[in-house]
Image (cartoon, grey):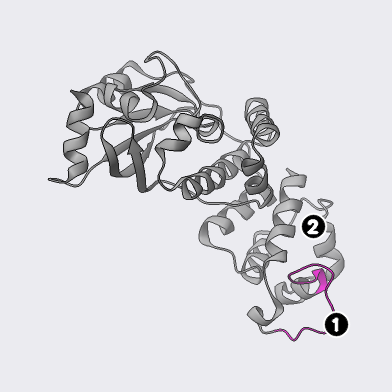
Amino acid sequence: MRDELAHFLRTRRSRVRPEDVGLVSYGARRVPGLRREELARLAGVSPIYYTRLEQGQSTNASESVIEAIARALVLSEDERAYLHEIARPRPVAKSRTTTVEAGVERLITAMGDVPALVLGRRTEVLAWNELGHLLFAGHYDRDARPNLTRMLFLDPHTRELYRRWDEEAARAVASLRVIAGKHPDDPAMAALVGELTMKSPEFAACWAGHPVQVCTSGSKYLHHPVVGDVDLDFEALHLPGTDGHRIITYTAAPGSSTEAALRLIRS
């Protein structure tokens, strides 16, 4: 977790220009962004203390200090919450279940006109209804349980599915970063990140930038091999008492061509 904090602070410090925060820049800079002493001054802490924090040598920063650093770094709300999470990690409550409840499976099956999936915290598919399977992974067996992030970066059919693949990839990595920050000792997550870093230069480059974004809703722009372009809105519904499970539903605007396309896919 200390390495996670150190890397995050360095990447965020590098993107803040002195003129953006009212500072006058003197002399040539070897690296972009603020110097450590400049950020420390903006946050109201000593340069020595901030340096120790960025080097992962201090793990007892107060909430007020973390908040001051967040303001100095001009963090987004998601980044601010993430900084508090990794700077002052709290014990993660042990989940009560690691499998999909029968009632949850029945629920998504009953959503016959709505593509729906149940994902684990590492974006692995735990269950999907017929339309969800046909929409996102018709080239997989229905009983398969692939990982959506692995598919996105390593499966050529999935890459072709997304009309805005770059946006989708950036969002997937930013979301995975948030989850990894909450579970720093998860060996399966480390294995997934390691595999993708080794096999996908695009994933490796994006991961190195340390993007952070909580993705609970949004839009997806697909080009399905059977029906062509479809535009969908998605919502993530987190299931309490589970190991980070969430139901993802995808809906089309009423009367739209996408709504008609979903009916065609199902037929």
* Residue 243 rendering spot, x and y as whole percentages: 50, 28
Q: Which is nearer the N-term, disc 1 or disc 2?
A: 1
Crowd tier of the residue under label 1, counting other residues whose Cα lies within 10 Å: few below 14, some 14–19, many 20 or above: few
**Residue drawn at (21%, 25%) of the image:** 266
Specify the label residue 64 is tagged with.
Answer: none
In the rendered image of this protein, does residue 46 appear above or below residue 122?
below
Q: CA distance from mark 1 to mark 2?
A: 26 Å
For numbered disc 1, what is the local secondary structure? loop
As shown in the figure, which amino acid type bears the numbered disc 2? Leu
Q: Which residue is mark 2?
A: 53
Q: What is the quadrant of the C terminus in the image?
A: top left
Q: Position of 78 compared to 133: left or right? A: right
Q: Residue at x 52, y 44 (%)?
A: 169
Q: Residue at x 56, y 54 (%)?
A: 81
Quick one: label 2, few (<14), some, or many (20+) residues within 10 Å? some
Quarter of the image that includes the N terminus = top right
The circle drawn on residue 27 is 1
Instruction: Find the magenta span and give its range.
Output: 23-37
For the question of whether residue 113 can be seen, the reply is no
Callout 2 secondary element: helix
Quadrant in which residue 187 is drawn: top right
| Front disc: 1 or 2 | 1
Q: Nearer the viewer, residue 154 or 110?
A: 154
CB under 8 Å between discs 1 and 2 = no
Is residue 175 visible from the viewing direction of this image?
yes
Examine the rendered structure and indicate whether residue 245 appears above or below residue 68.
above
Residue 176 lies within the magenta run: no
Classified by dominant secondary structure, the portion drawn in magenta counts as loop
Q: Position of residue 39 (x, y in %)?
A: 75, 72
| Residue 178 image-quadrant placement | top right
Residue 76 placed where, x, y %? 54, 62
- 140 on left or right of 52: left
